[in-house]
Amino acid sequence: MPGRVTLTAAALSEAGVETWEVKPVDLAHLLVLNGNIGHDENRLLQMASSVRGRVVGIPVDLGARVRKGDALLVLESVDLGKAREEFLRETSSLRVASRGYDRAQKLVEAKAISSGEFQAREGDYLSRKAAAQAAERALHLLGDSDEEIARLKSAAESDGVLPSADAPRLTLRAPFHGRVVDRKVTPGSLVE
């Protein structure tokens, strides 16, 4: 018979294999103890939004296994929309100031403008650059991904306007592989 191994009594003894007959036994020595079952706190993470908004989607069910990067929650946020608009405005202003600064460099070299005028344009350029960088940092702090910020930069470089159907949505993603063990929100919930 395939998959079956037969050992002699001597081989069983040498290998230290012992067998017992299965039968009911008295469990008088059984201990009854209280206990708790919980999650390993070192592997438990409570997700939170860094932006106020309304929950518009929860793509995973309670108990579902998730992989790193899977969407857990989708929020729609007016605050995020305002931050994105600010980023677009500052990036567009930086583009214009950069062109003015480049022109001013050529003009000052040709002695067509004064060094004071050049310094004014350089100051405007540096100010716009700092404002654009601050707006980008704000988007990172609110949870926007590098891909989303690159998409916004591309829009600012073209015409600076996002399509009107583009809702200010933020997707919270799983930071590691795991399982959804609790959920405190439902679609339509407002989060702070």
Image: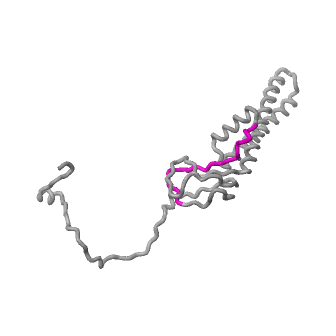
Residue at image position (87%, 30%) is 117
Q: Is residue 20 above or below residue 105?
A: below
Residue 148 appears at what percent x and percent y?
65, 41
The range drawn in magenta is 161-181
Residue 165 appears at what percent x and percent y?
71, 42
Question: Hey, which quadrant is residue 152 in on the image?
Answer: top right
Does residue 22 appear left or right of residue 129 in this picture?
Answer: left
Q: Is residue 35 above or below residue 101?
A: below
Question: Hey, which quadrant is residue 185 in on the image?
Answer: bottom right
Residue 164 appears at what percent x and percent y?
74, 41
Locate the C terminus and report the quarter of the image it occupies: bottom right
Question: Hey, which quadrant is residue 26 in on the image?
Answer: bottom left
Q: Is residue 165 magenta?
A: yes
Outermost residue toward the top in this view? 110
SS assignment for the magenta stretch, majority? loop
Q: Nearer the viewer, residue 119 or 66?
A: 66
Q: Is residue 187 above or below residue 128?
A: below
Residue at image position (40%, 75%) is 33
Residue at image position (71%, 51%) is 77
The colour scheme applied to this rendered structure is one colour
Residue at image position (22%, 68%) is 22
Residue 175 appears at what percent x and percent y?
55, 50
Does residue 58 appear left or right of residue 117 in this picture?
Answer: left
Q: Is residue 143 magenta?
A: no
